Amino acid sequence: MTKDINRKVLTRGTRVANALRTAELEVLKGNRSGRVYKKPSTYGKSRTKSTRKLLKDYGHKLRGGQLYRASAAGEAPARRTGALRLQWSAGVEKVGTSSNKTEIVTYIESNTPYAQYLEKGTAKMQPRPYMEKIKEQAAPEICKILNEDYS
């Protein structure tokens, strides 16, 4: 019976990681309210529907290229390339196991090198916090998973 419960603990850890990943996808999608910028390296490319919508907020003449709206300070980061939103890894690790209990740590982490700069900010940029928002959004689902009966 102990082996069965320990297996269920690991399974629930994986489900918690999936809940965190789903919350991360939700937090990092959608529109933002910051400044409008021209995307680097898009000169001469055709204008997209989203670029045409942002032209009036750009404030400059656009001679080719594409535009995007950045996030404002305090908002979750805006999506320019999509790398932050898509490059995450999840894990479930055993941190303690004895004959009658199993302890695990479940996590998701970004594989992008600039994720911490967005979360905490830099000398030139205000923070764009998203980690707490992910935890808050995933909390109800995580509580539901962890409070299920082991029978």
Image: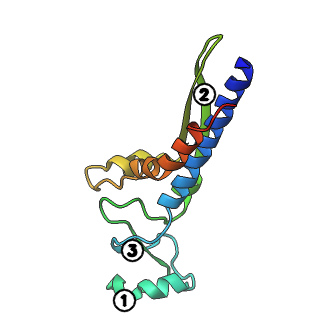
Residue 144 visible (yes or no): yes
The answer to whether residue 90 is above or below residue 4 is below
- Image x and y of residue 131, in percent: 42, 48
- Image x and y of residue 32, in percent: 40, 70
Within 10 angstroms of label 2, few (less than 14), some, or many (20 or more) residues?
few
Indicate which disc, 3 or 1, sits on the residue closer to the N terminus: 3
Q: Quadrant of residue 37?
A: bottom left
What kind of residue is marked 3? Answer: Tyr
Q: Nearer the viewer, residue 64 or 93?
A: 93
Residue at (36% x, 52% y) in the render? 129
Label annotation for residue 56: 1
Q: Nearer the viewer, mark 3 or mark 2?
A: 2
- Image x and y of residue 116, in percent: 40, 45
Q: Which residue is mark 2?
A: 93
Query: Could you tell me how far apart the alpha carbons at marks 2 and 1 are, in whole angstroms?
Result: 50 Å
The answer to whether residue 58 is above or below residue 74 is below
Within 10 angstroms of label 3, few (less than 14), some, or many (20 or more) residues?
some
Query: Could you tell me how far apart the alpha carbons at marks 3 and 1 are, in whole angstroms?
Result: 12 Å
What kind of residue is marked 1? Answer: Lys
Q: Which residue is mark 3?
A: 37
Indicate which disc, 2 or 1, sits on the residue closer to the N terminus: 1
Query: Could you tell me how far apart the alpha carbons at marks 3 and 2 are, in whole angstroms?
Result: 41 Å
Residue 61 visible (yes or no): no
Residue at (65% x, 38% y) in the render? 14
Within 10 angstroms of label 1, few (less than 14), some, or many (20 or more) residues?
few
